[in-house]
Amino acid sequence: MPQTIVTVPTRGQGLYEFTGEAAAFVRGAGMEEGVLTVFVRHTSCSLLIQENADPDVRRDLDQFFRRLVPPSDDPAMRWIVHTLEGPDDMPAHIKAALTAVSIGIPVVGGRLALGTWQGLYLFEHRDRPHRREIVLHLGP
């Protein structure tokens, strides 16, 4: 089965699209039908399929999650015990737990069966830059 690892560099919290890399991998594999499994190998970021036409959608989602789970030095988060790696770390784990670390996407006619406005995103939950590894696996 075809498989590869895509590295997505991040500059801090936010959504980083990698639809093009996933689509190129599927095209190159030459498989007409199947399922692309996308898996992120980290515990403080996640994956989303989301609108890729209006950047306001990404900004609003990012702001929603920042409000939903503020940094651990926020007074509302005093209950957090895991603070060794900074005030953004445990909130990043919570955000990843609320979203997905693995997504399956059908492949039809040799292409990802995403909708017109759908894109594939890495959702970075940490403040500092990272190089995130995403495993792409194409199966029948």
Image (cartoon, grey):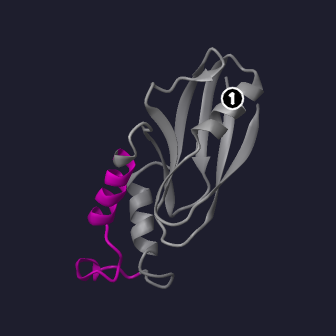
Left/right of residue 1 with respect to residue 40 in the rendered view: right
Q: Residue at x 33, y 64 (%)?
A: 66
Viewer-proximal residue among 12 and 103? 12
| Image position, residue 4 (x, y; %) | 74, 42
Name the amino acid type tagged 1: Val
Chain part drawn in magenta: 57-81
Residue ID at (47%, 82%): 86
Residue 45 versus residue 21 in the image, above or below: below
The x, y position of residue 57, in whole percent, is 35, 45
Q: With 23 as the anchor, is 15 left or right in this view?
A: left
Residue in the picture at 49% in, 68% down: 126
User: In the rendered image of this protein, does residue 22 appear above or below residue 71?
Assistant: above
Asked which quadrant contains residue 19, the reply is top right
Total labels drawn: 1
Q: Quadrant of the N terminus?
A: top right
Find disc 1 in the rendering and name its residue: 26
In the image: residue 40, left or right of residue 52: right
Q: Is residue 84 above or below residue 39?
A: below
Horizontal side of residue 105 vs 14, given as left or right: right
Give the class, few, some or many, for how many residues have Cα within 10 Å of label 1's Cα (few <14, many ≥20).
many
Task: Give the quadrant of the C terminus.
Answer: top right
What x and y, as percent, mark residue 79?
29, 80
The residue shown at (46%, 64%) is 13
